[in-house]
Amino acid sequence: MFENLTDKFERAFKVLKGHGQISEINVAETLKEVRRALLDADVNFKTAKDFTTIVKEKALGRNVLTSLSPGQLMIKICHEELAELMGGNESEINIKGNPGIILMSGLQGSGKTTFSGKLASYLTTKKGKKVLLVACDVYRPAAIDQLHVLGEQLNVEVYSNKEEKDPVKIALAAIQHAKGKGFNVVIVDTAGRLAIDEVMMTEIAKVKEAIQPTETLFVVDSMTGQDAVNTAKAFNDKINFDGVVLTKLDGDTRGGAALSIKAIVEKPIKFVGTGEKMDALDVFYPQRMADRILGMGDVVSLVERAQEQFDEEEARKLQKRIQKDQFDFNDFLGQLQQIKKMGNVKDLMGMIPGMGKAMKDVDIEDDAFKHLEAIILSMTPKERSNPQIINGQRKNRIASGSGTNVQEVNKLMKQFEDTKKMMKMMSNPKNMMSMMKQMKGMRGGMPGM
């Protein structure tokens, strides 16, 4: 996510990190590189110029030139302004009402229908809401079918009427149905076009006027860069939406849409889509996104994802097993499966400070743990519970059963032993305190921490 932009920001700041004499000329040169990085990322020209002007004024106002750490102070100011450029603080979705009504808008192909399913999953699993999805794309039967497929996957009811060709009537009937069946939230998926046209705009404006949604969201493909901003402006001028959803942020995204939309349209980004799976949806946090753009990782989001998969009772049981030196391959497999549930492995690695750059050219598949699971599942129950009995003959059988080789089995055995030692050390409070002190000592010397 934004790897090229991150690289260019790092190069721009290099001169202020002790690699040259600090002067007003150097600061100006650095900001020239920052502006170039923003323009390369397809950020609106005026937005990029205004950004560097504000940073320069604040930098000189805070006496960056005489600071003991001019590079770090400059990064801090850029971080603050990047976060402000993207909205400052996260913006919550409004689902109040009886029921709360969310109207989806956007061009065809932006990921609107998929996002409707993701939002339904998010509101159902994380907010405890009873959600009704409504299919109002009367022009594409495939879009209606797609919404029904998503509804079945999520166990969420979908309201549709293929015989009715008026989306206003469909939406109003769905809301009445929702009121009668006790739904908390109604998500109305509307029709899109390949390009903006008056018919589509008039139609969605009529739907909005008729159903009076509590929230209107504009869904846009973040890979379209500045075009996404122009489209957002056109939609906002017509229907005055409440917030933006950026989809496909895990793709080849330069960052222009994320960095420009708030400044140009003056509406907050509320959600970002980061994959095809129904749980690949994140609330948009400008501060955290600024962290990632400047190569600082996103530890808070990483911890939150871990907590979602965290079972306190299971963790206590596991801790006791570790302390008694009973950690086995069943436990190891369970940990792998929990990590898989947290999302794309490369994306998770990118949330760790300093790892984003290191992982840039590393290709990690979504099923990166598949061969590890195959090896463990090729073991007998006795072998999984007692790894010490696995000898050469057993390794040959396990390799054959898992479609791997003995070298890969040996590699997994070593990973298991290393993990076991580390977890045993971490389960001891004294060792944890020692590690925390060491990390605290390292913190000052790590850029961005």
Image: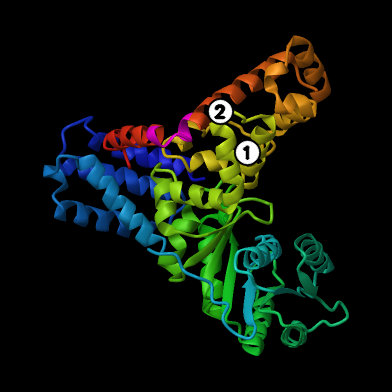
Q: What residue appears at the point 78 percent right and 84 percent down from the top-left corner?
A: 166
Q: Nearer the viewer, residue 391 or 402?
A: 391
Quarter of the C terminus within the rendering: top left
Q: Amino acid at mark 1?
A: Gln
State whether residue 299 is above or below residue 416. Answer: below
In percent of width and height, residue 54 lies at 26, 58
Q: What residue appears at the point 51 percent right and 63 percent down from the top-left corner?
A: 229
In percent of width and height, residue 233 lies at 51, 70
Residue position marked by numbered label 2 in the rendering: 419
Q: Which residues are magenta?
A: 425-430
- On residue 335, the disc is 1
Measured in 3D between alpha carbons, the distance from the residue under mark 2 to the one under mark 1, in whole angstroms, is 10 Å
Q: Is residue 123 visible?
A: yes
Give yes or no for residue 236 being in the magenta stretch.
no
Secondary structure of residue under mark 2? helix
Q: Residues within 10 Å of mark 2 (few under 14, many from 20)?
A: some
Q: Residues within 10 Å of mark 1 (few under 14, many from 20)?
A: few
Cβ atoms under marks 2 and 1 closer than 8 Å: yes
Q: Nearer the viewer, residue 234 or 62?
A: 62
Q: What residue appears at the point 79 percent right and 11 percent down from the top-left corner?
A: 393
State whether residue 414 is above or below residue 98. Answer: above
Q: Is residue 408 visible?
A: no
In percent of width and height, residue 74 lies at 25, 46
Residue 245, quarter of picture: bottom right
Q: Residue furthest right?
A: 163
Q: How many marks?
A: 2
What coloring was used for the rendering? Answer: rainbow
